[in-house]
Structure formats: structure tokens, C-alpha cells
Amino acid sequence: MATILVVDDELGIRALLSEILTDEGHTIELAENAAQARAARERRRPDLVLLDIWMPDVDGITLLKEWGSTSQLTMPVIMMSGHGTIDTAVEATKYGAMAFLEKPITLQKLLRAVEAGLAKPAPRQADGGAPGGLPLRGDAGLTVESAMTGGLGLPPAQPLQLGPQSEQSFDLDRPLREARDAFEKSYFEFHLAKENGSMTRVAEKTGLERTHLYRKLKQLGVDLSRNKRGAL
């Protein structure tokens, strides 16, 4: 699998992205600022970089420009931000970023973006427009993410399958642990379906911290890889 460098000043985001991508079989390098990102890039030569825009020392756009101007942009870079604008996305595109993920990042978008990034060579720096020479469209409804791909956006997500209903029956003639696990699995699957796969909203609904919730779902065998649902 690939080596992925995650650059984000938020410990919780780094930890959760690392856990999810490690579960997918990737080797993860972590950096909380530009200095650590530079060192990690030299040390491991990652196949892909997930780069936050807003960091306290050097912002992600500046670091992206630096790598591009020094011929170090040898890997695809996916930008991340919770406060991005279309202008920021266009600027990142000019300097070689291949995609933009708006926080909170859904598991589905994260894994699809990573898969797409690893399938492509490192983007070349362009003087304008989107990667691959795509012109930026001026649609009124253009989002930050779609601006990074010339208005095309990532492939549409597959709709969630209809989840379990609020009333169900359970086989109680079984050991307590098995009965409890069956109930908890159905409980979480119901709320995932009800909240359209948002891990953030399910965490709020169930009173669990998101990392704990993610681990609980994996423990119960809830198939996140199929639906790739939830929000970071």
C-alpha cells in the first residue's frame, strides 16, 4: 500500500485520519506543522500528502508553493480546511493541489479522494485553471471542492442503503454478550442510516467521542468500508 503524509495542527484530526488510513492498509506519517512536514517528506518521500491550509507557523498554501518552486512537488497533494473559499481552492490548484476536502471530512470523501490521488501521478504546476488544464467554471453553485476539479467535483457518492428500522426484534435465547453486541450493532446502524452516515451527528446523538465511536463500530463489525459513511 501507500505511504501517506498527514499534515494538520489538530491532534484529534491527525489521530483519526491515521487510524482510518492505517485500517485501509497504508503507512502513515504525521506532521503538525510545516517544519515537521518538510522533514517527513525528505525522510519518507510519501506517495500522497493530506495538507491542512490553516496552520500556526506556515500555512498549507505557502508550503505547497515552496514544494512546487523547489521541484519537490513529486507527489499528489490534497488540501484540507474547515474555512476554505473558492478563491483559496483556485489558488491551491494553481500551485499543484489535486483536490480539496472541506472539514468535517466524510469517510466516503476521504477514502475516494485518497484512492483517486494514489491512482494519478503528481500534478504539474499550472499557470491557471484546474489540474489537467480543466477551465474553472463560473457556476453560481460552485463549491470549494468542485472548484478544485474545474467544477466537476469528485464522483458522486453512492447512496446509503436503507438502514434498520426503529423497531426490531432480537433473539434473547443467547449469551448476554452476544445479545448485547447484536443490539448495539443494530442501534448504531440505525443511527448511521438516520443521520445519513454522519459520524459527527451519531457521536453527538449517542454521547460518544468520535474516535471511540469509530473503534466501537469496527469492534461490532459495522461495515464502514462498504458504505464509507460518517464524518470526521
Image (spheres, rainbow, N blue to C red):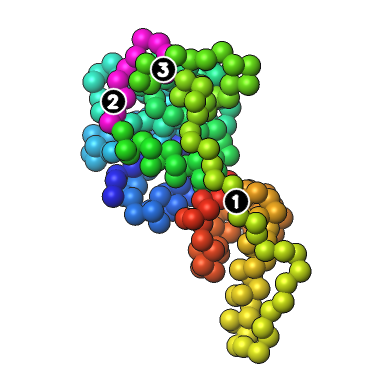
Q: Circle 2 is placed at which residue position?
A: 73
Which of pointers 2 and 1 indicates the residue nearer the eye?
1
Q: Which mark is residue 134?
A: 3
Provide the secondary structure element on which disc 2 rests.
loop
Tell which circle, 2 or 1, labels the residue nearer the N-terminal end. 2
Residue at 29 percent across and 46 percent down: it is 2
Q: Which mark is residue 160?
A: 1
What's the amino acid at mark 2?
Answer: Leu
Task: From the top left corner, tell me how far across and down residue 210 is, in percent.
Answer: 58, 53
Residue 125 magenta-drawn?
Answer: yes
Residue at 59 percent across and 16 percent down: it is 139
Position of residue 193 relative to residue 130, above or below, is below
Tell which circle, 3 or 1, labels the residue nearer the N-terminal end. 3
- Between 178 and 55, which is closer to the camera in this rendering? 178
Provide the secondary structure element on which disc 1 rests.
loop
What's the amino acid at mark 3?
Answer: Leu
The alpha-carbon separation of the residues under discs 3 and 1 comes to: 31 Å
Task: From the top left corner, tell me how far across and down residue 115 is, in percent.
Answer: 38, 42
What's the amino acid at mark 1?
Answer: Leu
Q: Are circles 2 and 1 on residues that touch, CB within 8 Å? A: no
Q: On the rendered image, what quadrant is the C terminus found in?
A: top right
Q: Quadrant of residue 190?
A: bottom right
Tell which circle, 3 or 2, labels the residue nearer the N-terminal end. 2
Provide the secondary structure element on which disc 3 rests.
loop
Residue at 51 percent across and 19 percent down: it is 88
- Between 98 and 84, which is closer to the camera in this rendering? 98
Residue 44 magenta-drawn?
Answer: no
Residue range (magenta):
121-130
